[in-house]
Amino acid sequence: MTTVYTYPEQSVTANVVPSDLQFKRNGLSQIVTEDTGTPSNTRPLPVLNYDSSGVEIDFATEATLQTLGTEATLSTASSTLTSILAKQTYAPRAKSRIAFASTNVTSGAWVELLSDVGATAIKRVQVFMSQGNALELGFGAAAAEVSQMFIFPGGNEVFEMDIPAGTRLSVRAVSSTASTGELLVNLLG
Amino acid sequence: MGRRTILKAFQVLDDADSTTLPEGPETDVSGLDFVTYTISVDSSVSAVAGVYVSRSDDKDGAYFSLDFGSPLSLNGAVDTDYIIKIENHGFKWMKINIDSSAGTGNISAWVSGNARGA
């Protein structure tokens, strides 16, 4: 190479036309081409992918996919989608009624509402209570009940709630005894 | 009408150490349309050249530096051959100097010229 300086300063106008991108395909020059009409005539530019250590990534192996987290991500997404879809429709699994006039519910002992919700986990609960004193709902075997939530006075509610299969349900009063009205519960899952 | 002639190439710089900032001799370029300096440098040279011209008939008249738009860098690490092409806009005398040098090494320069039709 030789460097050339010119006086006066040369003003050069050039029309630059981009040339087609080429690569060697099987030793022969090949223009990079995309043919949307006949896709088999498409000649994309070969591309290799390398990790941060300069090692080529082989996307074809399951190990590579796992390393990249793709399979795990898809699995998680699939589980999430399955879970969401499962929540869309529920079947009735159990129901229970307590008539407070005949079965008073005090703040002392737990009163069994349902001995077992059944073999299917419960996802949705419908509650109707026609008396004015709050109750609390408990899970667990007799003498081992654990309070989970309140049932509001006059409550008429539908809510999502996970209740494991086989769970025993009980109620007791928060303060005042429930001696009139009734409690109706539908369990869906 | 200026004289039609060709200035045969002759050496104007032959410097064994560019740090001495050598100056070339004044060259009569009157009548020439184009003047060319051909320069060869060692790879260790890092210098900047300057071309000085005068429109005076007197060889020792006032000279001024030609503006090439960028410094006439002689960087031996980039190129060891340089060509300076000058269109003669009425200049009568011309010389090439080494204006600055941060490197060492040999700088050699030759000047030649020609006129249109000659």
Image (tube, coloured by chain):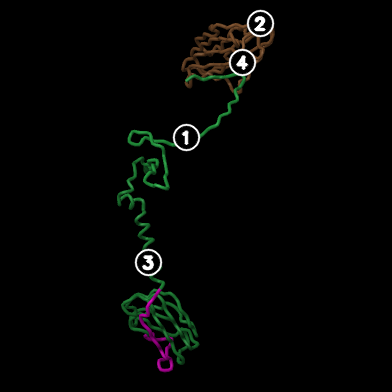
Chain colours: A green, B brown
Q: Position of residue A188 (x, y in %)?
A: 39, 78
**Residue on which disc 2 sits:** B59
Task: Give me the residue at 35% from left, 57% from top.
Answer: A72
Q: Chain of mark 2?
A: B
> Residue beneath label 1, please?
A19
Q: Which residues are magenta?
A: A89-112
Residue at image mark 3: A82
- Residues B35 and B53: in front is B35
Please check the rendered image and state whether residue A98 is part of the magenta-colored stretch, yes or no.
yes
Which element type, helix, strand or loop, lies under badge 1? loop
* Disc 4 to disc 2, C-alpha distance: 19 Å
On whether disc 1 and disc 4 are found on a single subunit, the reply is no
SS at circle 2: loop
Under mark 2, the amino acid is Lys
Above or below: residue B28 compared with residue A5: above
User: x, y (%) of residue A161?
Assistant: 41, 75
Instruction: Name the secondary structure under disc 4.
Output: strand
Up the image or down, A162 lies above or below B10; here it is below
Element assignment for label 3: helix
Point 44% across, 37% down: residue: A21
User: What whole-number distance in Å separates the C-alpha atoms at marks 4 and 3?
Assistant: 82 Å
